[in-house]
Amino acid sequence: MATLAIDGVRWVNDRVTNVRWGSFDQSTNVWVTPTSIVEVHQVVDAIKSGKEVRTLFTLGGRTFLGPKVSALPYANVHEGIEVRVQDGQIEKSLEDLPAV
């Protein structure tokens, strides 16, 4: 089953503005679609439509799905994204992804 996965981010003033993402099949450990760079509002729209979005990290030459991504409301009506880490867990974050 394919999951939308983010493997790179672009930051402006401590906010993610763009991501590199695509559809990733964790059972075969390969991209199902080519990755593309999109604006963060497209990620927020996907999350709001019920799609699962996860981070994707490469460690030791292998790829691993990281924490789920959720929408984050900002005071100025814009929305961003953040990773959802449960209490007590140590996980990778958006800051650990490479810049795009």
Image (spheres, rainbow, N blue to C red):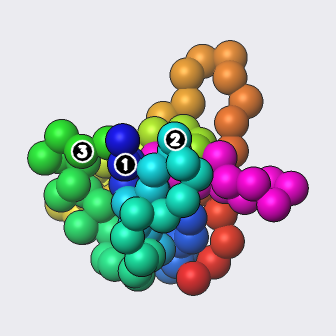
Q: Which residues are magenta?
A: 53-64
Q: Tell whether 70 sits left or right of 58.
A: left
Visible residue check, residue 76: no
Q: In the image, which disc is placed on residue 71?
A: none
Residue 63, x across and y down, in percent: 67, 54
Q: Earlier in the sequence, mark 2 or mark 3?
A: 2
Q: Residue furthest front?
A: 28
Q: Residue at x 68, y 17 (%)?
A: 88
- Tell which tag, 2 or 3, sits nearer the viewer: 2
Check disc 1 and report the residue beneath it. 2
Check disc 2 and report the residue beneath it. 27
The alpha-carbon separation of the residues under discs 1 and 3 comes to 11 Å
State yes or no: discs 2 and 1 in contact (Cβ < 8 Å): no
Q: Quadrant of the C terminus?
A: bottom right
Work out whether residue 73 or residue 5 is closer to the camera in this orientation and state it: 5
Q: Residue at x 65, y 46 (%)?
A: 64
**Callout 1, which amino acid?**
Ala
Residue 3, x across and y down, in percent: 38, 48
Check disc 3 and report the residue beneath it. 51
- Tell which tag, 1 or 3, sits nearer the viewer: 1
State yes or no: discs 2 and 3 in contact (Cβ < 8 Å): no
Q: Residue at x 55, y 30 (%)?
A: 85
The kind of secondary structure element at disc 2 is loop
